[in-house]
Image: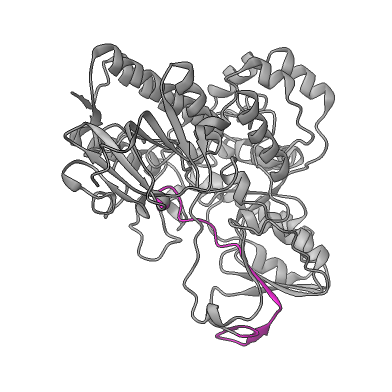
Amino acid sequence: MSEAASAMPLDILIVGAGFAGLYMLHKARRQGLNARVIEAAPSVGGTWYHNRYPGARVDIQSMEYSYGFDEALQQDWHWSERYASQPELLRYANHVADRFALRDGIQLCTRIAAAHFDEEHKCWQVRAATGEAWSARFLVMASGPLSSPNRPDFDGLQDFSGPVMHTADWPHEPVDFSGQRVAVVGTGSSAVQAIPLIAQQARELIVFQRTAAYAAPAHNGPLDADFEATIKRDYAGFRARNRRMHGGFSAALPPNPVSALAVSDEERKSAFESRWRIGGFALLGAFNDLLLNERSNALAAQFVRNKIAAIVEDPATARLLQPTHTLGCKRLCVDSGYYATFNRPNVRLVDISTQPIERFTPTGLKTGAREFDFDALVLATGFDAMTGTLMRLDLRGRGGLTIQHKWHAGPLNYLGLGIAGFPNLFNIAGPGSTSAFTNIIVAIEQHVDWIAECIAHLDAQGLATIEPSEAAETTWTEHVNAAARRTVFLSCNSWYLGANIPGKPRMFMPLASGFPQYAQRCAEVARKGYEGFVLA
């Protein structure tokens, strides 16, 4: 591109107006930097703008899944539920945009088409699909790890005559399934949340399952006033304690510091039962080795299978709903009545692991076993996670190096923040960081703070560019792989590996070593003059 002369000069161009983009804009302005956010959607909110399917809600408790950078904000805001729903999370994002007067720095309904690094001027030349262009010293990708819906290329899908909805790109007008026959393809987190509510409306619901999901009960409800008051008396301390936890949350319920193999059967069952009654991700902390030791994991997995068998009345359906893979190698779902929904007379479960979908028809779909007719289709097929958004962009670094070429074998990076060959480019909560295993807002705040301090350092030293060395990138990728090998995460195919996308390189993308260790490493790199980066 050659728009340098006419492009609007910026210090930072930020792609995405979700929680990462909003905080990055606020932080940049606090440092006196000229920043602008470009967002494809007509609203702020990112994930919580698009994912508005029935039952959509966060799986981290609301008091933790929120910004901690401003004491007045966290004291003033009141969450209505233990786990906030999509509408409330979207209201929160809009409140933040208004409270910190960010809207004049956000350009909505604008999709970035290309971003090329201009080596002569040491800046990024960025162009929108409309042709509008900007020049920026730094480019920050705040597009999120789960922002590109996975739309499988089903044969004949275009022939289906009814409405087709994707959970990650849900219609904005109300959807009423009353009296309809509805099909849901997929049983991951979004399906687990949506299916109970769709079943309450639909005349008939057919769920097509390839891989059964582990789900723990949310036990959601109105936020307890005493609990809220206790946290708000020392919110700063609460945040600090959470940041010392492996996942950046649940300091109030730390993992049991013993192995599942070191206790009696009775003690083990009691611990599992206690965590099940608490709900959410608490189950994974029942013992300290559930995600590290296959034998310990198998005991927890069997506990969940027993719960499913006790909830689901039909033995054949219960068997299909009982996962056989390792607990936690795919993200644990947090549900509200998912398994019990299959006791409803209007709900059917179809196993497509052995008889996969062959093609869609004008009235439904055909598997290897039979044909199914329905009126509406819901695709709960997840995301092209962590790399999808960047890989769909015309993103070019030094010498015209494309991100598609750079990442053809997997997402090479350093600290999850920078990519060799792409100077002054920062990626928030992407591959190589702990974002997938961390309270995402904790991960976002840590990344944004680090990026802002890095830019301040460059400006103070009169430096123009920063990018990782290839050696640092190689070492970091080996570190990410080594951390995964110490866990159970490699024991099954998951979006952590890119296994849900045909043709995507199989590479374990998130860092599994824990947030505190990762944050300490990032801080150490900065203290050592940005060790592993090339500054010019």
> In the image shown, does 484 or 34 lie closer to the viewer?
34
Name which residue lies at 32% across and 14% down. Answer: 527
17 sits to left or right of 392? right
> In the image shown, does 228 or 13 lie closer to the viewer?
13
103 sits to left or right of 427? right
435 sits to left or right of 477? right
Name which residue lies at 63% across and 35% down. Answer: 93
Residue 471 can be seen in this image: yes
Please state the horizontal and vertical placement of residue 397, each as a whole percent of the image: 23, 42
Name which residue lies at 42% across and 50% down. Answer: 389
> In the image shown, does 225 or 135 lie closer to the viewer?
135
> In the image shown, does 13 or 340 lie closer to the viewer?
13
Name which residue lies at 79% across and 24% down. Answer: 227
| Residue range corresponding to the magenta coloring | 362-388
157, above or below 274, in the image: below
The quadrant in which residue 348 appears is bottom right
Q: Quadrant of the C terminus?
A: top left
